[in-house]
Image (cartoon, coloured by chain):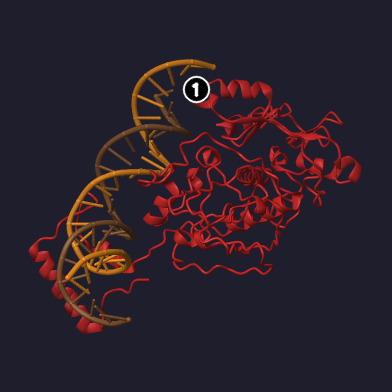
Chain colours: A red, B orange, C brown
Amino acid sequence: MLKKENSNNWARVCDSCHSATCTVYCRADSAYLCAGCDARIHTSLMASRHERVWVCEACERAPAAFLCKADAASLCASCDADIHSANPLARRHHRVPIMPIPGTIYGPPAVHTISGGSMMIGGTTGEGTEDDGFLSLNQDADDTTIDEEDEDEAASWLLLNPPVKNNNKNNNYGMLFGGEVVDDYLDLAEYGGDSQFNDQYSVNQQQQHYSVPQKSYVEDSVVPVQNGQRKSLILYQPPQQQQSHHLNFQLGMEYDNSNTGYGYPASLSHSVSISSMDVSVVPESAQSETSISHPRPPKGTIDLFSGPPIQIPPQLTPMDREARVLRYREKKKNRKFEKTIRYASRKAYAETRPRIKGRFAKRTDVEVEVDQMFSTQLMTDSSYGIVPSF
DNA sequence: GAAAAAATCGCTGCCACATACGTAG
DNA sequence: AGCTACGTATGTGGCAGCGATTTTT
């Protein structure tokens, strides 16, 4: 909805080149700059310290004042007021004051000087990984937007703490270290299904290894909900776990908390809050695990979900944060959106099954006989049997 | 420009039944 | 421990229906 207004002819042009549409506003220079000019001007160390903010994505004429999480858009005060007073739904959009863009966003990565999750609000961190998109000069504005969203999404993960449901007195759940989230959060559904419970971190081990999932058929990734359900969960953290740990980061590696039997309780959900573009079809079992926001606790168990939300403030170091963002991006890149067929035999049967308006219909006796004859003949002709399940 | 209508899009539930899985004997 | 029988749960695809969103009038 914001983009409609972007197409107008009133977008402010770059004060430097006077040709391209501006994307950032430099407060030090009091200048609106396009991506190219901003990169050129602010690549030097001194200039990179200029405080800049994104230009409002709606009017493209004023510095952004707020970041709307729902729209993933930076908006000036005027547009923010207009857009978010339009209807009750819009009013509920979570907006935060926009933060200045740290360092140089187009050149080499800026040195991390900001710690903690709140640095993410502006949508940039100056990270310099090859694919993080911050950003080469050749990349266009769309890429910028995508990377903003990507970064913001990653940030939203980092800002949250994972739920830990304490129903096993011997487990530390492998989820928290010094108030921070261990792998399972960013590695949600790395292998899907039960396998996520195998992701473990060994406090006293320095070596890392992959936890081989027992059921590896679900490869889909799950983006965690940005707020709401998971936030409201109670975190438990054994005191000794708070002391220290090594975050032996390697891209794509799984941590191993071997002294945890299960990283997650089975009833814990990975709620999904993603756009329709990000929706991937997953097997029903996996889907159910990821879509039930508040599973009803079994009888005799304590409902840890019903209490007031308790949040432990994030204590991420910049290195931790960077590691997680990288891991998040890696996983996002490897996400699979195809539907995973677990049982080919069932697929084969479903495809041959008679339907009425798309629904499976009962087979008549004649159809059953014909089908049996057909399948028998096939077996004799080509040794065709039941499609093996996998 | 605003409002209403129409069109489009995306998600969800339903159905039957072979197969997987768990339990008891 | 291994086997069998039985009951229950799961997964599969295409369509209708619904709500949300976008486009047209």
Q: Under tag 1, what secondary structure?
A: helix
Whether residue A307 is visible to the viewer of this picture, yes or no, is yes
Q: Nearer the viewer, residue A117 or A205?
A: A205
Q: Residue tagged by mark 1?
A: A88
Q: Position of residue A19 (x, y in %)?
A: 77, 36
Residue found 49% across the figure and 45% down from its top: A272
Q: Chain of mark 1?
A: A
Residue found 69% across the figure and 53% down from its top: A132
Q: Specify the quadrant of the image occupied by residue A172.
A: bottom right
Outermost residue on the left side: it is A365
Whether residue A127 is visible to the viewer of this picture, yes or no, is no
Residue A390 against residue A189 in the figure, above or below: below
Q: Specify the quadrant of the image occupied by residue A266.
A: bottom left
Q: Residues within 10 Å of mark 1 (few under 14, many from 20)?
A: few
Residue A154 against residue A86 in the figure, above or below: below
Q: Is C4 situated left or right of A73 in this image?
A: left
Q: Position of residue B14 (x, y in %)?
A: 23, 46
Q: Position of residue A372 (x, y in %)?
A: 15, 72
Q: Nearer the viewer, residue A296 or A343?
A: A296
What's the amino acid at mark 1? Pro
Q: Quadrant of the C terminus of chain A?
A: bottom left
Q: Is A147 situated left or right of A29 in this image?
A: left
Q: Is A256 situated left or right of A18 in this image?
A: left
Residue A37 against residue A80 in the figure, above or below: below
Q: Position of residue A351 (x, y in %)?
A: 27, 62
